[in-house]
Image (cartoon, rainbow, N blue to C red):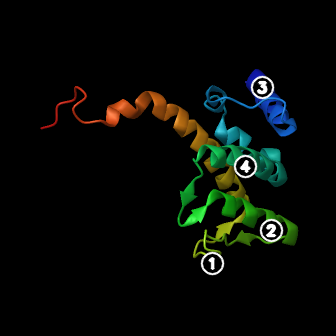
Amino acid sequence: MKKLSIKIATSIALLTTGLVSANAAEYSKIDVEKVCNVKENGISKVIETAKQYNEIAIKEGLEFRRLGVNNSGLITSVEEAIKTGAKEVNPKDFKGKASKTKLETNFAAHRSCKFAIRALQQAEEAKSTWRLAIPGDGYKYK
């Protein structure tokens, strides 16, 4: 467990310096709940992690959009809440209008981090599981 957390910390540090670009196989090894835990890591560290992985997800065309809000909008709203000390965030959607979604700040930070990493993990998982969803690939439907 300790080795895994050291590897995660090292990979995050290398990603921030730009020395190494992480490959998709590394994303699947990340423990999302541990990396995105606001109580253990602090809200600012969690939101920085979310920003790092969300940038990669945007480059890959994989950014999460949930309840009418892009993940980058959620990250921005959490950053604003940290600056102002707000207890709730109201993220903006892609048209710049306020959404109906109101979230507690710590939960929004956890959620944005989780969405950024899971987008990359799900893309990697889909490479091996997509055939299971194709009808006529050996599966019999009644």
The disc at residue 50 is 4
**Residue marked by disc 3:** 7
**Separation of marks 2 and 3 at Cα, in angstroms:** 30 Å
The structure residue drawn at horizontal position 41% and vertical position 31%, both measured from the top left corner, is 129
**Separation of marks 4 and 1 at Cα, in angstroms:** 22 Å
Give the quadrant of residue 108.
Answer: bottom right
The amino acid type, in three-letter code, at marker 2 is Glu
Expressed as whole percent of the image width and height from the top left, the position of residue 11 reads 78, 30
The amino acid type, in three-letter code, at marker 3 is Lys
**Residue marked by disc 2:** 80
The structure residue drawn at horizontal position 77% and vertical position 21%, both measured from the top left corner, is 3
Dot 2 alpha-carbon crowd within 10 angstroms: few under 14, some 14 to 19, many 20 or more? some
The disc at residue 97 is 1
* Label whose residue precedes the other's in the sequence (1 or 2): 2
* Label whose residue precedes the other's in the sequence (2 or 3): 3
* Label whose residue precedes the other's in the sequence (4 or 3): 3
